Image (cartoon, rainbow, N blue to C red):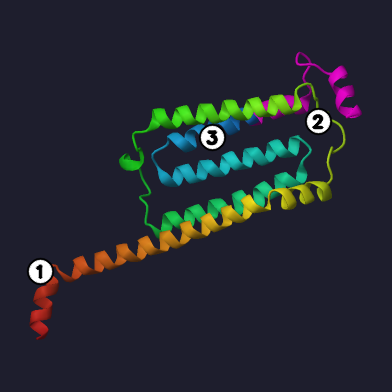
């Protein structure tokens, strides 16, 4: 806490450091990538922009001297979750190009929920830290051991729940792809050419 208060007395909002400027620029890029992710009508492009968004968050963690969380972000979310989403898109044979039916028509409801969630998150963070100031140019504030212990002791249940949800999504994608293949095979068998071929073999 001494390092935090010393940094607060030394720096101010009108005299940002290089790390703070980089944090702001990366945050703007990440925010823009997140907007493109939820507004584009091309599913593959949305998944790729999601990679940019999650990668920007990892860079933000690095700038906040949270190296462990940054690599967890890269390995789990960028390396696993996005790959799983891409596999799901491939298994369900999602269209590569523009998808007019990708918009559900509930943009205003989604925007309202997003703004409310963002306001609640900002309020919680500001209320928790208030005048606490982290010296981004100083040494790392937390160790990997303490971060890992807090992550896997207090947050292990959400991690396990997320893994179950992702597994269910993958199984659902496989089931949908098998149904689509069965439907296409049945439609191919019912074509006039297939019927004539069957009658000729008889």
Q: Earlier in the sequence, mark 1 or mark 2?
A: 2
Circle 1 Cα neighbour tier, 10 Å, few/some/many (<14 / 14–19 / ≥20): few
Q: Is residue 16 above or below residue 183?
A: above
What's the magenta region? 1-26
Instruction: Please give the residue where the numbered disc 3 appears in the rendered image.
Output: 33
Q: Earlier in the sequence, mark 3 or mark 2?
A: 3
- The quadrant holding residue 106 is top left
Image coordinates for residue 52, horizontal then vertical, percent = 57, 41
- The quadrant holding residue 176 is bottom left
Task: Return the residue nearer the eye: 173 or 70.
Answer: 173
- CA distance for labels 1 and 2: 71 Å
- Residue that lies at the very extreme toward the bottom in this rendered image: 202
Give me the disc on residue 136: 2
Cβ–Cβ under 8 Å for marks 1 and 3: no
Q: Say which residue appears at 76% left-offset and 35% top-offset.
A: 64
Image coordinates for residue 150, horizontal then vertical, percent = 76, 47
Can residue 14 be found in the magenta stretch? yes
Q: Earlier in the sequence, mark 1 or mark 3?
A: 3
Can residue 196 be found in the magenta stretch? no
Instruction: Please give the residue where the numbered disc 1 appears in the rendered image.
Output: 192
- CA distance for labels 1 and 3: 49 Å
Circle 3 Cα neighbour tier, 10 Å, few/some/many (<14 / 14–19 / ≥20): many
Image coordinates for residue 138, horizontal then vertical, percent = 87, 32
- CA distance for labels 3 and 2: 24 Å
Image coordinates for residue 87, horizontal then vertical, percent = 47, 58
Q: Is residue 128 above or below residue 188?
A: above
Q: Is residue 60 above or below residue 174?
A: above
Which of discs 1 and 2 lies nearer the camera? The answer is 2
Q: Say which residue appears at 87% left-offset and 17% top-offset.
A: 9
């Amino acid at each position: 806490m001494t390092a935090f208060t010393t940094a607060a007395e030394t720096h101010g909002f009108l005299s940002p450091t290089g790390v703070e400027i980089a944090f702001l620029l990366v945050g703007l890029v990440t925010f823009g990538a997140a907007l493109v992710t939820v507004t584009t009508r091309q599913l593959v492009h949305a998944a790729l922009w999601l990679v940019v968004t999650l990668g920007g968050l990892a860079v933000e963690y690095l700038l906040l001297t949270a190296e462990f969380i940054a690599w967890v972000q890269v390995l789990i979310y960028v390396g696993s979750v996005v790959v799983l989403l891409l596999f799901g898109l491939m298994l369900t044979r999602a269209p590569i190009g523009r998808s007019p039916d990708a918009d559900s028509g509930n943009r205003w409801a989604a925007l309202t929920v997003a703004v409310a969630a963002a306001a609640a998150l900002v309020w919680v963070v500001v209320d928790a830290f208030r005048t606490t100031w982290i010296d981004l140019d100083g040494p790392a504030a937390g160790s990997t051991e303490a971060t890992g212990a807090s992550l896997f002791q207090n947050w292990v249940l959400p991690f396990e729940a997320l893994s179950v949800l992702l597994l269910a999504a993958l199984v659902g994608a496989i089931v949908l792809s098998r149904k689509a293949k069965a439907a296409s095979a049945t439609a191919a068998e019912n074509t006039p050419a297939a019927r004539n071929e069957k009658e000729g073999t008889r």
